[in-house]
Amino acid sequence: MISKRIYTGFDLIKLIAAICIIAIHTKAPFLNIIGRLGVPFFAIVSSILFFNHYQRLTKYKERKDYLLKFCRRIFLLYITWQVIYLPIAVRQWKVIMVSLKGNSFKNMLVYLVDFFFPAVYNSKGVDLTQDANGWGPSWYLLASIIALPVLIGLLRLFKQRTLPIFIICAMVEVYIILADEFSDWTHLSPIMNHTFLRLLIYFCLGYLIVCYHELLHSWSKYSVQLLVVCFCLFLVESLIVGHFTGNYNTEEIITTVPTGFLLALVAMNYYPRLHYPVQVRNMSTFLYCFQIWPIVVMRKVFETRGWESQHLILFLVVLIISFVCFFLYEKCRQHFKWRFLKYMV
């Protein structure tokens, strides 16, 4: 079991990851490639922190309550931001109803499914759900609420045996890679990309890090060197895939899992001195959730000015707006003490 401590390395790298995820959605060159490690890192870290406490609990009710607490916290985060994104969701509802040719009961059911799985694409990269709930990054929160209970269910089913669970998760990951990186050859649909299935391997890795921490710690001194090698391979593989497919920030490639795993290990043993670690932690969550509003607004501004190709400038503008809004949020939270404000992070 990992000792209880404040992992400032997690906090700092989560902030960097959140910034790089903004780069994905603004198509900022190079950083958008690195950003593809953001979700794997978030998922592994969340799993480590969850299971490090969960495994210490001995009673079934205690574990059940802790799982419910985790899911409730994520759901409150999701629903709070969903209220903020309602104007975009309403706009998307109108777009989807037009594309489905009417407001029939069947079309409403289709919309509701799309609402909770808002970022699904077919094998040709066509958006099937049209960002139904208004903010694509929400898929990660929804997937986390499902993925963790599913993993715990697998642990109970296989009586805590890690090998069969890892094999199942790895098989799902293999499909995702075949459907994403090698889609031109396999013609498989990447329909799993933004669902809980994509997170299973990363939640499983977090669980394994907690279970085999002593063993992993024995060779942690090599983790930085291994991370450098894996990161370089990740960049090379991404560039090769991008050269042949035109997509330089593919969701999952072969080196994504090992690079994300090693990044989490290095961050776990890295303790930068942060004066306000909680604020840094909150900032990463705020940036991840807030980014869509400034992207939507500034992209419209850039289109009217004829700056559609200025992706790096768009990224910097959105990033500055997001930081400013976070500090305004912190001021409001400290001054007004409204309950819903704490649910935003």
Image (tube, rainbow, N blue to C red):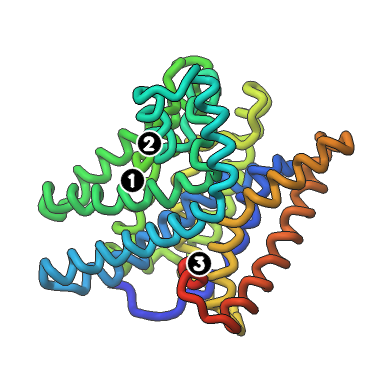
Category of crowding for the residue at label 1, using alpha-carbon neighbours closer than 10 angstroms: few (below 14), some (14–19), many (at least 20): many
Q: Do the residues labelled 1 and 2 touch (CB within 8 Å)?
A: yes
Q: Distance between the residues labelled 3 and 1?
A: 23 Å
Instruction: Classify 10 Å Cα crowding around label 3: few (below 14), some (14-19), many (20 and above).
Output: many
Does label 3 or label 2 sit earlier along the sequence? 2
Q: Earlier in the sequence, mark 3 or mark 1?
A: 1
Marked residue nearer the N-terminal end (1 or 2): 2
Query: Where 337 falls versus 77 (above or below)?
Result: below
Crowd rating for badge 2 (residues with CA inside 10 Å; few <14, some 14–19, many 20+): many
Mark 3: amino acid: Val
Front disc: 1 or 2: 1
Q: Which of the numbered marks, if any, corresponds to residue 93? A: none
* Cα distance between the residues tagged 1 and 2: 8 Å
Given residues 117 and 264, the one toward you in this image is 117
Position in image of residue 247 (x %, y %): 64, 29
Dot in front, 3 or 1 = 3
**Circle 1 sits on which residue?**
200
Which structural element holds mark 3? Answer: loop
Residue named by callout 3: 345
Number of dots carrying numbers: 3
Residue 328 can be seen, yes or no:
yes
In the picture of the structure, the residue carrying the numbered disc 2 is: 173
Residue at coordinates 49% horizontally, 60% vertically from top-left? 223
